[in-house]
């Protein structure tokens, strides 16, 4: 009986401390994107990715030569953020983050894994 009471007394503070510690954790947002040409499926090197979120500075990432874009930031981002992918000579593509968010933590988007197809702009070679 004494042991059960001791477990109950120690269990509550430990549970409360663990809950508080987890509530203070802000998960990271990680983006992995593949940018391709809609014309032939070829990778689009050096695409510019911007993420505009309410009450945050504009976030930027630049694509690699193989068309991939990797980006991470703390904390997770609001689903209200708008992601825009652009490259000279191509039409930009924009979408709300919630539309393609691949993982969530609470109300935050913590992961974006997607392929984006850019279409050549009119008059572009």
Image: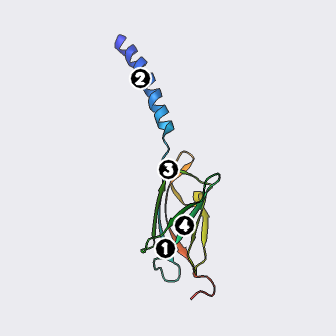
Number of residues whose C-alpha sits closer than 10 Å to that of mark 4, classed few (under 14), some (14–19) or many (20 or more): many
Rendered image: mark on residue 74: 3
Q: CA distance from mark 1 to mark 2?
A: 53 Å
Q: Nearer the viewer, mark 3 or mark 2?
A: 3
Q: Decide: marks 2, 4 in contact (CB < 8 A)? A: no
Residue 9's x, y, as percent? 42, 17
Residue 1 seen in this snapshot: no
Q: Does residue 68 appear to the left or right of 78 in the view shown?
A: left
Q: CA distance from mark 4 to mark 1?
A: 9 Å
Rendered image: mark on residue 49: 4
Rendered image: mark on residue 46: 1
Q: Nearer the viewer, mark 2 or mark 4?
A: 4
Rendered image: mark on residue 11: 2
Q: Decide: marks 3, 2 in contact (CB < 8 A)? A: no
Q: CA distance from mark 2 to mark 4?
A: 47 Å
Q: Nearer the viewer, mark 1 or mark 2?
A: 1
Residue 63 seen in this snapshot: yes
Q: CA distance from mark 3 to mark 2?
A: 31 Å
Q: Secondary structure at mark 3?
A: loop
Residue nearest the viewer, comparing 98 with 83: 83
Number of residues whose C-alpha sits closer than 10 Å to that of mark 1, classed few (under 14), some (14–19) or many (20 or more): some
């Amino acid at each position: 009986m004494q042991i059960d009471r001791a477990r109950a007394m120690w269990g509550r503070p430990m549970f409360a401390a663990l809950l508080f510690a987890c509530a203070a954790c802000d998960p990271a947002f990680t983006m992995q994107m593949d940018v391709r040409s809609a014309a032939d499926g070829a990778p689009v090197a050096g695409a510019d990715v911007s993420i505009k979120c309410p009450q945050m500075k504009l976030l930027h990432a630049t694509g690699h030569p193989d068309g991939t874009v990797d980006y991470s930031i703390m904390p997770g981002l609001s689903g209200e953020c708008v992601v825009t992918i652009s490259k000279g000579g191509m039409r930009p593509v924009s979408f709300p983050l919630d539309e393609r968010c691949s993982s969530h933590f609470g109300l935050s988007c913590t992961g974006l894994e997607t392929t984006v197809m850019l279409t050549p702009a009119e008059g572009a070679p």
